[in-house]
Image: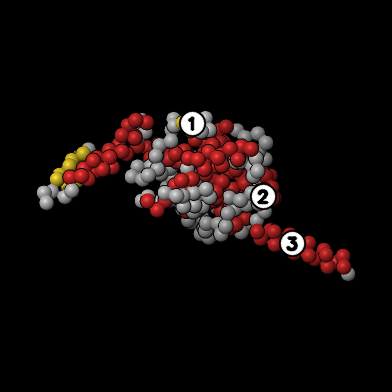
Amino acid sequence: MDIKVLEINKVRINFKAPGLILLAMLMVMMPVSAASRTGLSSSLITEWESEVDRSECPDFLYPSHNPSIITGKKVYQNNCAKCHGSFTDVDPQLVSYMRKRTPEKQFEAVCGGNHNFKVRLTIDERWDALMYMRTHILGYYPKGSDVGASMDSLFGGNCAICHGTRGQGDGNLHKMLYPPPANFNMFKRLYTRSDEKLFNEISYGIPWTAMPAWKDRHDFDRHQDFDEEMVWKLVRYVRSFAYSQELDRLDKGRQRLEEYKKSIGESN
């Protein structure tokens, strides 16, 4: 069979089946055309953060389970609020700064420097406090709220077919996609990305994957534009897969133990 040679954007591809030429054109041109349509600069598709310097945090580990912002509130109040205060009035400049930082990098800062919480707090307590701080600066959807329910609907109608309703990358199409859709429950994926990087990935898509650009799309069923404000709301929603709004399971155990001790005392 004759070998067909196709050259697109200075990329030469050899084919034994002429019928694959159209597919190849789409594969090669898609990332380029998407970038040119949106004006996406090369700096926006690079990683925001360099590798974490483990010298400041030699005991670094990802959480053993979803950090609890309920437990984190208590840890934060006892260890951080004296210097950093509460979040009743958040400075927009602080929000902008936080959007550029990854949870992983911030965990490193909590471990070392003037904080040195690696001596005073367990790894899970540090993650709890950090995620409490991030959610109350960058915002979150309270469990059972109307806005949370509306975001469930938006995500379910547009994103869950690939990412799954629980964000585990197990949607109906996931077996047909390579690389597979992102699993937002994987700490190593979500905690190594800044909010700005997530914003860019949702807005402009990810080249060489099935992740499309959502910027300026429209959800006709929900009458919702995917404008800048909505993309930031989606970033906030995606973050919610990697923290918990319930009491930490270990604290639940301690609470039950205390209740049991009191019941014994009362019976005596």
Which of the marked residues, 1 or 2, is nearer the chain's N terminus?
A: 2
Viewer can see residue 67: yes
Say which amino acid is labelled 3: Arg
The secondary element bearing badge 2 is classed as helix
Say which amino acid is labelled 2: Ile
Q: Where is residue 69 in the image (x, y as percent from the top left)?
A: 63, 49
Badge 3 density bin: few <14, some 14–19, many ≥20, Cα 10 Å: few
Residue that appears at 18% across and 48% down:
17
Residue assigned mark 3: 256
Q: How far apart are marks 1 and 2 (CA)?
A: 37 Å
Q: Quadrant of the C terminus?
A: bottom right
Residue assigned mark 1: 220
Pick the front one: 111 or 180: 180
Q: Position of residue 235 (x, y in %)?
A: 51, 40
Residue assigned mark 2: 70
Residue that appears at 56% across and 36% down:
95
Pick the front one: 95 or 150: 150
Which of the marked residues, 1 or 3, is nearer the chain's N terminus?
A: 1
The secondary element bearing badge 3 is classed as helix
